[in-house]
Amino acid sequence: SLEGHTNRVTSVSFAPDGKTLASGSGDNTVKLWDAASGAQKSSLEGHTGDVNSVAFAPDGKTLASGSDDRTVKLWDAASGSQMCSLEGHTSLVTSVSFAPDG
């Protein structure tokens, strides 16, 4: 069991290589986990509402998260740094995904 979020987990996604698991939560964070050991690798903070969906890009280098704060954020999966915040939705974001070709 992976422990670290302080509210319900709403979404999980494995990186394409299977080595990292991302989880989004009602605590407004995304956490990255080492899939083999279960150790938390990083906590991605920046959303101001529940994180409803997480998804890795096909190359595993970028992670997207969608939130009740009406944003989609793109994160560098290796460093955990926020790359950009996509704003303009008029309601919460319930799902994110990448095209198969990235």
Image (cartoon, rainbow, N blue to C red):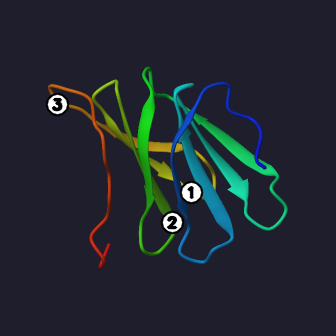
> Which label belongs to residue 88?
3
Nearest to N terminus: mark 3 or mark 1: 1
Give the alpha-carbon distance from disc 2 to disc 3, as whole Å: 24 Å
Q: Residues within 10 Å of mark 2 (few under 14, many from 20)?
A: some
Secondary structure under tag 3 reads loop
Query: Are the two marked residues, 2 and 3, in contact with CB atoms closer than 8 angstroms?
Result: no
Task: Tell me which corner region of the image, top left, top right, bottom left or bottom right, holds residue 30.
Answer: top right
Q: Which mark is residue 61?
A: 2
Q: CA distance from mark 2 to mark 1?
A: 5 Å
How far across and down, in percent of the image, does residue 25 sit? Answer: 54, 34
Q: Viewed as shown, does residue 49 lie left or right of 61?
A: left
Residue lying at 47% horizontally and 55% vertically, measured from the top left: 63
What's the CA distance linking mark 3 and mark 1?
24 Å
Q: Position of residue 80 (x, y in %)?
A: 60, 47
Labels 2 & 1 near each other (Cβ < 8 A): yes
| Amino acid at pointer 3 | Gly
Helix or strand or loop: what does disc 1 sit on?
A: loop
Which residue is tagged 1?
77
Viewport quadrant of the C terminus: bottom left
Asked if residue 2 lies left or right of residue 8, the reply is right
Q: Is residue 6 left or right of 37 when viewed as pictured?
A: left
At horizontal 78% and vertical 49% (from top left) the residue drawn is 1
Which is more toward the observer, 75 or 51? 51
First in sequence: mark 2 vs mark 1: 2
Question: Is 71 displayed left or right of 2 in the figure?
Answer: left
Tell me the amino acid under the disc marked 2.
Answer: Lys
Toward which corner of the image does residue 51 lie, by quadrant?
top left
Label 2 element class: loop
Give the mark nearer the N terminus: 2 vs 3.
2
